[in-house]
Amino acid sequence: MALTISIEHLDGTTVAWLAGDLDGDTCAELGAALAAEAPEGSLVVDLGQLTFIDSSGITELVEARATCVERDDSFTLRSTTPPIRRVLEITGLLEHFGLV
Amino acid sequence: MVDLEHLIGSNEDGLVLPIEPVRGHLGVIRGEVRRFLDDHGIDDETWLLVANELVANAVDVVAGADPDRCATDGEPAILLSLAVDGDRVALTVANVGPAFELPDQSSMPPATSARGRGLPLVRALVDGIRLHRVEGISIVTCWRAHPAVGRRT
C-alpha cells in the first residue's frame, strides 16, 4: 500500500496523519512533506492508520524528531498500533520516542 | 554466467521472485510474500518485514556497486526464494555484488543513528540466519518456526 500523508495545523502544532506503508520507497515523501508543511512549531505524527514500517521508515521518524529537537520544538509520536510498536521496540526506540 | 537460482537450490513448491536492483518495488514484493503465505494458511506479518529488509539491503548493495562487478548477462541480479519447510518458513535472498557482513546479535545502532537498523532487525525477528558467499554471490538464508505451518485456515 502506498503512503498517504495528511497535514493539519492547529494552534502552532502540526499534526501529520500517516496511513499505509512507510518503507524505503515511500519514506522520502514524509521527509519532503514535513519540510514543506511543518518547517516550524511542534509536530505530532499520528501512526494510527499506518499498516507497515521498515527500518527506513524508522529512520525517517528519527530524523523528523531530530529536526524538531534541533529547533527546540516538541515532537510526539502517537497512536502506535501493536505491529508498529513491535518494530520500535526491537529497534530500541520506544524510550527515544517517549512511548514508555 | 550468473545463475542465482542454481546457486540457491530448487524451490519447486515455493515462491521464487527475480528482483530488479532498483528502488520502488518493496510494496509489490511484500504483496507477493503475503499472497504466498496466505495460500499456505500462514499468518505471520514478520516475513513481510524480513523480506522487505533483505531485499532493500540487496538493492542497496547492487545499486551502490561498480556496475562491472554486478554484470549478470541479463540474468536477475537479486533473487528471493520463500518456502514452507516442515514446521518452519525459510527465506533466501541472493544478490550479486560486493560482499557484506551480517551484524552481531546486539548491534542495533544508537537511537540517534540514521542508518544500520535493517539487518539487526532481521536478526532479531528470525530464529536463525546464515550468510554465505559463493562465486561472488551473497546468499542470506533465514528461517523461523510457525505453529500455523501446514494448517489451512
Image: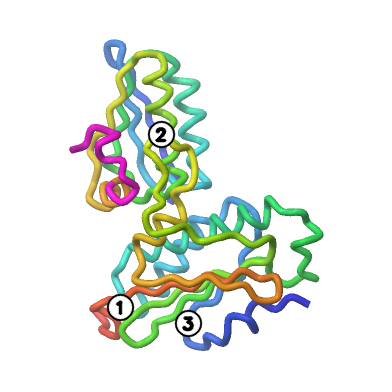
Query: Which region is colored magenta?
Result: A89-100
In the picture, which quadrant includes the C terminus of chain B? bottom left
Amino acid type of the residue that numbered disc 3 sits on in the rendered structure: Gly
Q: Name the element at disc 2.
A: loop
Q: Residue at x 35, y 42 (%)?
A: A19
Q: Which residue is drawn at 55% across and 76% down?
A: B16
- Label 1 or label 2, whichever comes before in sequence order: 1
Q: Position of residue B151 (x, y in %)?
A: 25, 84
Amino acid type of the residue that numbered disc 2 sits on in the rendered structure: Thr
- Residue tagged 3: B14
Q: Which residue is drawn at 23% across and 32% down?
A: A98
Q: Which of B2 and B35 is in front in this view?
A: B2
Q: Position of residue B137 (x, y in %)?
A: 66, 71
Relative to A79, residue A65 above or below: above
Residue B123 quadrant: bottom left
Crowding at dot 1, Cα within 10 Å, few <14 / some 14-19 / many 20+, comes out as some
Same chain assignment for discs 1 and 2:
yes
- Residue tagged 2: B112
Amino acid type of the residue that numbered disc 1 sits on in the rendered structure: Gly
Q: Is residue B113 rendered to the left or right of residue B65?
A: left
Q: Residue at x 34, y 73 (%)?
A: B144
- Label 3 or label 1, whichever comes before in sequence order: 3
Magenta region's main secondary structure?
loop
Nearest to the eye among marks 2 and 3: give it.
2
Q: Is residue B42 rendered to the left or right of residue A61?
A: left
Q: Residue B41 carries which label?
A: 1
Rounded to the nearest angstrom, the CA distance separating label 2 from label 3 is 39 Å
In the picture, which quadrant includes the N terminus of chain B? bottom right
Nearest to the eye among marks 1 and 2: give it.
2
Q: Is residue A46 magenta?
A: no
**What chain letter is assigned to the residue under label 3?**
B
